[in-house]
Amino acid sequence: CDPIHVDRYQYLVASKEQEAIELGAITVGCQARVAKGRKFPVGTEGKVFWIANEAGSYGVLKVGMETADGEKVWINIENLERVKEVK
């Protein structure tokens, strides 16, 4: 797993959610976009509803994301980027 993604997630877990969000961390409830990978098309967006507590067998954190059409996808956190929220 990319150490940057692990650091961002651990930073969030350490109760510094607002600062983690400013750094672009993937959090439950945020909008995320597929930025790379081959399983799902780049640009696919959805709402994150689950993040694994620990890395899986391939050493990456898995994320559950629901797309706009209701499809639930399971993807590596490394392949996502947070979508900036417009205020």
Image: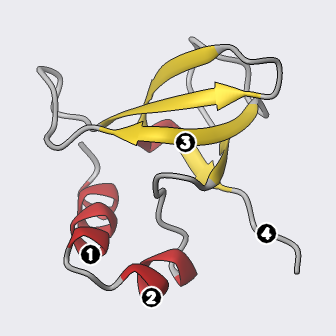
* Residue 8: percent from left, percent from top: 33, 68
Q: Tell me the crowding category of disc 3: few under 14, some 14 to 19, or many 20 or more residues within 10 angstroms, Cα based.
A: many
Cβ atoms at labels 1 and 2 below 8 Å apart: yes
As helix, strand or loop, the secondary structure at mark 1 comes to helix
| Relative depth, front residue between 48 and 76 | 48
Query: Which residue does the numbered mark 3 point to in the structure image?
Result: 48
* Residue 72: percent from left, percent from top: 58, 17
Question: The disc labelled 4 sits on which kind of residue?
Answer: Glu
Question: The disc labelled 3 sits on which kind of residue?
Answer: Val
- Describe residue 44's horizontal placement relative to residue 5 as left or right: right
Query: Which residue does the numbered mark 2 point to in the structure image?
Result: 19
Q: Earlier in the sequence, mark 3 or mark 4?
A: 3
User: Residue at coordinates 43% horizontally, 42% vertically from top-left?
Assistant: 78
Query: Which residue does the numbered mark 1 point to in the structure image?
Result: 11
Q: Nearer the viewer, mark 3 or mark 1?
A: 3
Query: Which residue does the numbered mark 4 point to in the structure image?
Result: 85
Up/down of 28 relative to 4, above or below: above
